[in-house]
Image (cartoon, rainbow, N blue to C red):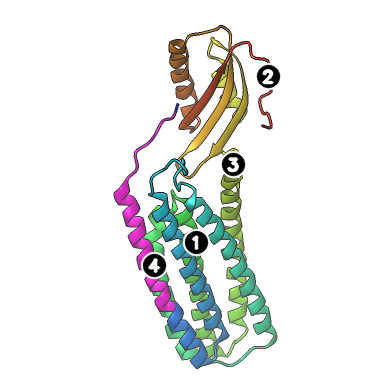
């Protein structure tokens, strides 16, 4: 038996609109920084443009995932596209780490071979990046707290805004003090932060895709709670997994003391659902058994 929760479609439409605005802003920043980087000879601007281009790709992935997640289930896609946003989070967090490594490599090269650049253009274009990414960050902040896909897009934009701040600081220090080494130093620090944030999201999305039990769920406590129901003899073959941000599924075999009727089972099933709901599980699938000769182990590799 399954319990379903209603979805706020206007909220999802708002997510899509905010993503489109962010995509358009990042396309504008990327084109501006590529042109500016070529004209000024700034590797900092070109590397920031690369980062922004990765943002455009990640935001497009997030938007496609948001659209797919709204599609209905069908006979050949019984879960619909509910995992699209988890896959998007996985791809985005992985690219986040790759971009960070590229920025570190780029920074090391700049440390070894600092170059004088047209800092005025760097300053103005980094300001454009800060404003545009800052606005995008504000648009996605609310959704990032409750959706893994939106959090991955939000992190891309937040770190890019910080990269633009680093480019701005570097531009100002180059202009007034001639400190050309400060820019790669700041870029390395931001890249390390990027890896730290990206790894956590990569780990979380990987756990969901691998059908691991959510960190917040204690399997033994759930089994103990179900086993306290008087009619239940044993709980085994337990599987708990997270389908997406909103759904945690439990399936289990339950051995009953007596050969009960279906109507009695329905009453007990309501009790089971009430118990597991306390642990954040909202989809329950129970296989009732009586006197069946199979493994009674809690976890069984099917």
Q: Nearer the viewer, mark 2 or mark 3?
A: 2
Neighbourhood count class around disc 2 (C-alpha, 10 Å): few under 14, some 14–19, many 20 upward: few
- Span colored in magenta: 2-29
**SS type, badge 2:** loop
Relative image position of residue 205 (x, y in whole percent): 56, 50
Residue 23 falls inside the magenta stretch? yes
Relative image position of residue 274 (x, y in whole percent): 45, 23
Circle number at residue 294 = 2
Q: Please say if the residues under marks 1 and 3 sit with CB atoms less than 8 Å apart.
A: no
Neighbourhood count class around disc 4 (C-alpha, 10 Å): few under 14, some 14–19, many 20 upward: many
Q: Residue at x 33, y 61 (%)?
A: 17
Q: CA distance from mark 3 to mark 4?
A: 31 Å
Mark nearer the N terminus (3 vs 4):
4
Asked if residue 241 lies left or right of residue 151, the reply is right
Q: Residue furthest front?
A: 75
**SS type, badge 4:** helix
Q: Residue furthest top?
A: 258
Q: Nearer the viewer, mark 3 or mark 4?
A: 3
Residue 143 falls inside the magenta stretch? no
Q: Nearer the viewer, mark 1 or mark 2?
A: 2
> Which residue carries the number 1 mark?
155
> Which residue carries the number 4 mark?
22
> Which residue carries the number 3 mark?
211
Q: Nearer the viewer, mark 1 or mark 3?
A: 3
């Amino acid at each position: 038996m399954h319990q379903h929760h209603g979805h706020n479609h206007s909220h999802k439409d708002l997510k899509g609109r905010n993503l489109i605005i962010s995509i358009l802003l990042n396309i504008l920043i990327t084109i501006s920084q590529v042109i500016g980087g070529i004209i000024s000879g700034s590797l900092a601007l070109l590397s920031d443009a690369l980062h922004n281009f990765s943002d455009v790709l990640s935001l497009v992935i997030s938007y496609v995932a948001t659209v797919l997640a709204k599609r209905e289930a069908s006979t050949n896609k019984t879960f619909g596209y509910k995992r699209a946003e988890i896959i998007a989070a996985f791809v985005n967090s992985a690219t986040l780490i790759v971009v960070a490594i590229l920025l570190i490599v780029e920074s090391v090269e700049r440390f070894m071979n600092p170059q004088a650049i047209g800092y005025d253009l760097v300053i103005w274009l980094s300001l454009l990046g800060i404003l545009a990414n800052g606005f995008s960050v504000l648009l996605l902040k609310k959704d990032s707290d409750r959706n893994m896909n939106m959090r991955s897009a939000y992190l891309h934009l937040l770190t890019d805004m910080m990269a633009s701040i680093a480019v701005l600081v570097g531009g100002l220090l180059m202009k007034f003090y001639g400190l050309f080494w400060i820019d790669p130093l700041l870029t390395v620090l931001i890249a390390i932060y990027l890896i730290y944030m990206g790894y956590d999201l990569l780990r979380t999305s990987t756990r969901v895709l691998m059908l691991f039990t959510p960190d917040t769920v204690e399997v033994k406590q759930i089994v103990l709670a179900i086993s306290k129901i008087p009619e239940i003899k044993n709980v085994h073959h337990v599987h708990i997994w997270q389908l997406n941000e909103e759904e945690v599924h439990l399936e289990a075999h339950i051995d009953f003391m007596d050969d009960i009727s279906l109507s009695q089972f329905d009453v007990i099933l309501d009790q089971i659902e009430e118990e597991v709901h306390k642990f954040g599980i909202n989809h329950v699938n129970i296989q009732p058994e009586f006197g069946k000769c199979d493994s009674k182990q809690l976890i069984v590799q099917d």
